[in-house]
Image: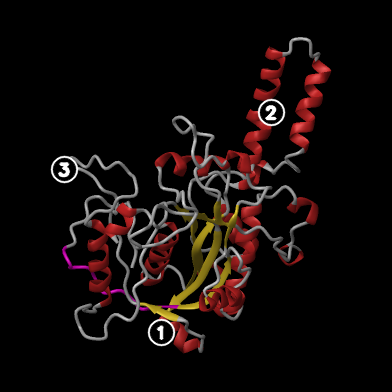
């Protein structure tokens, strides 16, 4: 059951067609404190807190300013804790024909996504169990935030030039060679420059398809926090329509660039207590996290016929606008919710052909509890 801000004209008529049951047959993750599915499950069972202080190589801790003396500036961040995937991830480059030297120029986010997608496919029994490559799709939730590679490229292109210009203005005695040494030293600190072909927006899924050898639909969707759930909804639609026999779906987010933190700090949605309390009365904001998670989906009948292991079955999903707004539709696009969330849930139940009022129909409710009071109230 998913909500997102994509359909402001939803009617919630309850006349939705019944969906084809879809099975989850493979899992793969790389998350804070959990490089794989087993360790993630152990963390859940044991109640492990994977939140840490920001690692030094992500952003300078001096940006953290809990109580500024005046109005908070854009470079003063109100929180310094979050969920980070900071350990090295061993990607089997040879398996996908990627030269190790070439890999140094690929956006790290793409290699992590490849690693997790391959793990999910292996967990599903391997690519041979998914059918013809032309009938295997990839749909990923991927926000429009700056990727690690793009962040470095921005510093190499824009920040280096600005730095040299400011130094030349403030210190006119510096000659050209001095300024070039400053530029070189600054860009050397950024590491190997990313290849431009790996940074073209919107190509993450298609690059994965190339490496994995799939030829079905391959694209990314952006619906903010709901991106990965919308990807699953789209994957179910492809399976229901018979366009695919298997779809890899999920979400990819590995960006802790300081600009992202600045946005949420200025919105006032980060927890200044450095703790997140979803749906709690004392909640004072969210903590940012990163990670990649993917699932492999097949029609339930196909999965059962093939003898696949079935983790769970998706019987219905619903989508609506979850952004608040006035009578003229002038929603501010912020975090506050609207009746659209209720409509999305109602649609999901209707599509599944189930009644939540019946005894025993609900076993678990997993809410989007962000720790932001307005958002939690809507949930």
Where residue 69 appears, as percent x and y from the top left, is: 48, 32
Mark 1 and mark 3: Cα distance apart in space: 45 Å
Total residue callouts: 3
List the residue tagged with mark 3: 327
Mark 1 and mark 2: Cα distance apart in space: 57 Å
Q: Residues within 10 Å of mark 1 (few under 14, many from 20)?
A: few
Where residue 325 appears, as percent x and y from the top left, is: 23, 45
Number of the front mark, 1 or 3: 3
Q: Earlier in the sequence, mark 2 or mark 3?
A: 2
Where residue 271 appears, as percent x and y from the top left, is: 45, 51
> Which one is nearer the viewer's eye here, 326 or 352?
326
At x 27%, y 83%, the residue is 361
Residue at the top extreme of this rendering: 172
Q: Quadrant of the C terminus?
A: bottom left
Is label 3 in a helix, a strand or a loop? Answer: loop
Asked if residue 251 lies left or right of residue 282, the reply is right
List the residue tagged with mark 1: 301
Q: Quadrant of residue 159?
A: top right
Q: Residues within 10 Å of mark 3 (few under 14, many from 20)?
A: few
> Which one is nearer the viewer's eye here, 376 or 213?
376
Q: Quadrant of residue 211?
A: bottom right
List the residue tagged with mark 2: 160
At x 29%, y 54%, the residue is 322
At x 30%, y 65%, the residue is 318
Q: Earlier in the sequence, mark 1 or mark 2?
A: 2
Where residue 223 appears, as percent x and y from the top left, is: 40, 52
Residue 149 counted in the magenta span: no
- Mark 1 and mark 2 residues within 8 Å of each other at the beta carbon: no
In the image, the segment drawn in magenta is: 13-23
Is label 1 in a helix, a strand or a loop? Answer: helix
């Amino acid at each position: 059951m998913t909500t997102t801000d994509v359909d402001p004209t939803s009617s919630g008529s309850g006349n939705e067609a019944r969906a084809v049951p879809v099975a989850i047959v493979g899992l793969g993750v790389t998350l804070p404190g959990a490089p794989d599915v087993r360790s993630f499950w152990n963390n859940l069972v044991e109640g492990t807190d994977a939140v840490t202080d920001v690692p030094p190589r992500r952003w300078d801790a001096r940006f953290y300013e809990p109580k500024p003396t005046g109005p908070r500036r854009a470079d003063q961040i109100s929180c310094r804790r979050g969920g980070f995937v900071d350990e090295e991830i061993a990607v089997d480059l040879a398996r996908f024909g990627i030269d190790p030297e070439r890999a140094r120029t690929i956006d790290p986010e793409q290699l992590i996504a490849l690693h997790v997608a391959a793990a999910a496919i292996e967990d599903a029994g391997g690519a041979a169990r998914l059918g013809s490559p032309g009938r295997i799709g990839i749909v990923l939730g991927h926000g429009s935030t700056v990727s690690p590679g793009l962040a470095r490229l921005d510093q190499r292109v824009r920040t280096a030039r600005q730095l040299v210009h400011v130094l030349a203005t403030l210190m006119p005695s510096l000659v050209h060679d001095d300024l070039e040494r400053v530029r070189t030293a600054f860009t050397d600190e950024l590491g190997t420059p990313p290849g431009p072909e790996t940074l073209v927006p919107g190509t993450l899924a298609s690059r994965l398809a190339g490496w994995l050898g799939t030829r079905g639909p391959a694209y990314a969707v952006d619906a903010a926090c709901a991106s990965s759930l919308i990807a699953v909804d789209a994957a179910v639609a492809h399976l229901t329509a018979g366009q695919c026999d298997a779809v890899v779906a999920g979400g990819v987010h590995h960006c802790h660039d300081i600009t992202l933190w600045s946005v949420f700090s200025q919105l006032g949605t980060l927890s200044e207590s450095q703790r997140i309390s979803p749906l709690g009365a004392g909640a004072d904001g969210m903590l940012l996290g990163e990670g990649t998670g993917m699932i492999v989906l097949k029609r339930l009948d196909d999965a059962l016929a093939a003898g696949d292991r079935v983790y769970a079955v998706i019987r219905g999903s619903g989508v609506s606008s979850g952004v608040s707004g006035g009578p003229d539709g002038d929603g501010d696009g912020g975090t506050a919710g609207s009746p659209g969330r209720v409509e999305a849930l109602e649609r999901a139940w209707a599509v599944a052909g189930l009644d939540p009022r019946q005894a025993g129909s609900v076993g678990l409710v997993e809410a989007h509890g962000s720790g932001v009071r307005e958002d939690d109230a809507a949930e």
